[in-house]
Amino acid sequence: MEEVKLRKTNNISEEELIDWLKFYINFGEIVNDTFPAKGACSWYPYGYSLIKKVLHLASIILIKEAKFKEIVLPSFVHGEDFMKECQNIKDFSERVYWSPLYKEDDLHVVTPTIEAQLGALYSKWLQENKKLPFKYFTIRGVGRYETGRTIPLWKERNVWPFFEGLTAHNSESDFLTTIKQQVDFMEIFFDKLGIPVLVVERPKVNPRLNEYSERRIEAVTITKDKRVVILANIYDLGEIFSKVYDIFYKIKNTKHYALTSAIGLSGRVLATLLTINGDKDGFVLSPSLAPIKLAILPVYSRESFTKLAKKIEVFLNKKGIISETFPAISSLGKRRKKIKAMGIPFIVEIGENEVRKSSLLLKDRFSNISVECEIKKLPLLIKRRSKILDESIKEKAFKEFKLLTKSVKSKKELLLNLKDEILTESFFCDDPNCYNQIVKLSKTEIIGRNYNTKTYKKHKCVVCGRKASQSIYFGIKWKGEK
Amino acid sequence: MDNKKLAFSDIPSDYPLPNLYYFSSKFLKEIRKQLVDTTSILNKNCFRQCHFPFLIPKSLLVYYNNLISLEDFIKVYSGKDKRSHAFLRPDGIFSQGITLAKEIIKSYKDLPLKLFEASSGYKKVKGKNKKNIFISPEESFSIQGGIFTENNDDKFIQSIISKIFKKYAISYTVKSDKSHKYGLINYITSIDGEVINLAKIYNFNQEVTQRANIYFFNKDGKRTFPYMYTFSLSQNIFLINILKNGRSKIKKNE
């Protein structure tokens, strides 16, 4: 595989960034996409440890903030149940994997989403007199038959991990509280990960959206190539799916359909995290997230070097600092390159000096700063430096994000920023002609309404001058993003 | 052994599809604890967890020669018009682990390579007693591991499996099938007179690595094929353990 360097300039094209990601995701031992099936990857142990941490974080926040419970579902849904979901999503039946699981003439589907599965289960539970609300999530692989180009962790046929939740409620206030809790979940989760996001709500300008949900709230970010990425979705499904799956409850013999919502995110979160923090040499991981905190490199294969490296590894692992020795199988240069690509936050090299003096130079991946330290003081130094690095990496990501997003008060400024492909927000009235005019003139897309702000109340529509009723973001999405 | 006891334990519950189960959150909490215990035994013995796709292309089926017949694989089609097809993996570590091992193994210093995965496998089920969770249904969860080594010695895996069974105090019988091409070792137990599979070990010698062209350079710089062993720990181990402890323990953990 040919090495791909990311240029330092800000003018990185989408293709360059994809090539960089594809190269380092393999070389940095996250996933191996040479697996002989299109759109399917194997996870290296290092990548698996990393994604496990991300998923664990998402799970505990969703359980704590939104009171969800985890469930494990089978990989199949019956064809009939799935076709009910297809009533609301055009051509969906063509974009999944069908299987003659038991009989050739009785087809099942490798589940592509949670709705059909939990919809059928929720209906069954209500018939068994279980009480609403239901708030469940699951983490598993799903099948999507993507016919276009696939990119590891970004657009896959065998999507793993797929983190999805579905809720059902018998009161509107409980339903709205849950939507709010899910938004809180998104904000807390991405903040903890160090990914700056905007929470937006999509206006119904996309016909696909009309057929699938009442509302769609998304967490979006922008990457170095100035492309907007959707990281997580919350769907306000209203009664659409409860009518399809018969998720109802009765009050005094009157049938009421439950209100439902869905939430989802995928491995794309990790791909984005790696992309926004990465540099020309590969990934840069926060110490709090890195599966290996310290890489120990004997400079060459001498017994005393290897022995000291192993001694330090055992010492640090006992202190809870995950460390790994990278033995002199290949040249020092090659190993340094590998460790940088993997984004391991700290590195020490073991040579003559280190063996003689019992002190080391602790170098970090992010700032390249080296600090001399006695071996016994290494745990304390790593812990102290880890905190600083966690903050610095996050700060840098948020600073870069700020440069790529703007809020402006005039049509002229808006069009100028959009010409530079900046994710830009401005004020609009309710008339679709106003925001559609910007789409036409700037050749960008509507990303969504700013979900959190009410500042538009003080402003006028930048197109027609009437009172503004919303602030809308415009930008360019990653290729193939709907 | 039917599912009455499981139903009583309020654990894996009927899913609205025959022969498939969902794991309730209560059950999941229990199984997670056991998974942590099991994976920590594996981690302490230098096994590293990875993850493989559930789709496998036809080209990988060749490695299942003598293990699973083609008709037992579950086929999937893309779109309803059956434009193209693939298969669902019966296990992860075996065929798919080979593709990853090929990327990792370069030198004798990369050995032994010990990988494992905790996930689902899929295969057609034959026989009358399909509605029994202890007889592998079409989709079953398991822990599968693979070892690539310089030496032909499967005692190591046997000792790991013994440690895991000891941890759960599961009584078992080991049955070695000397006539099996890949030296199958079967770990079984019996509940209410019914034989329940617990674990399996296969010794592939150098046959599979040779076929997959996985090689390393030994200390003398000579190109060599590693030995390969695989094991699988069935979900039955966890189910038996939960059944043994019963409903009260699960309630306590709620």
Image (spheres, rainbow, N blue to C red):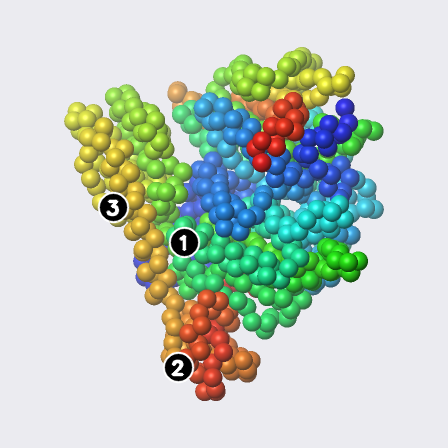
Residue A89 shows which numbered tag?
none
Q: Are marks 3 and 2 on the same chain?
A: yes
Disc 3 designates what residue? A368
Given residues B14 and A330, the one toward you in this image is: B14
- Pointer 3 or 1: first along the chain: 1
Picture quarter with the C terminus of chain B: top right
Q: Nearer the viewer, mark 3 or mark 2?
A: 2
Instruction: Pinpoint residue A128: horizontal percent, then vertical percent.
Output: 75, 45
Residue sitting at x 73%, y 39%: B14
Given residues A81 and A258, the one toward you in this image is: A258
Chain label for disc 1:
A
Q: How crowded is mark 2: few (under 14 residues within 10 Å), some or many (20 or more)?
A: some
Picture quarter with the N terminus of chain B: top right
Element under disc 2:
loop
Measure how far apart labels 2 and 1 are at the Cα level.
30 Å
Instruction: Pinpoint residue B36: horizontal percent, then vertical percent.
Output: 51, 30
Chain label for disc 3:
A
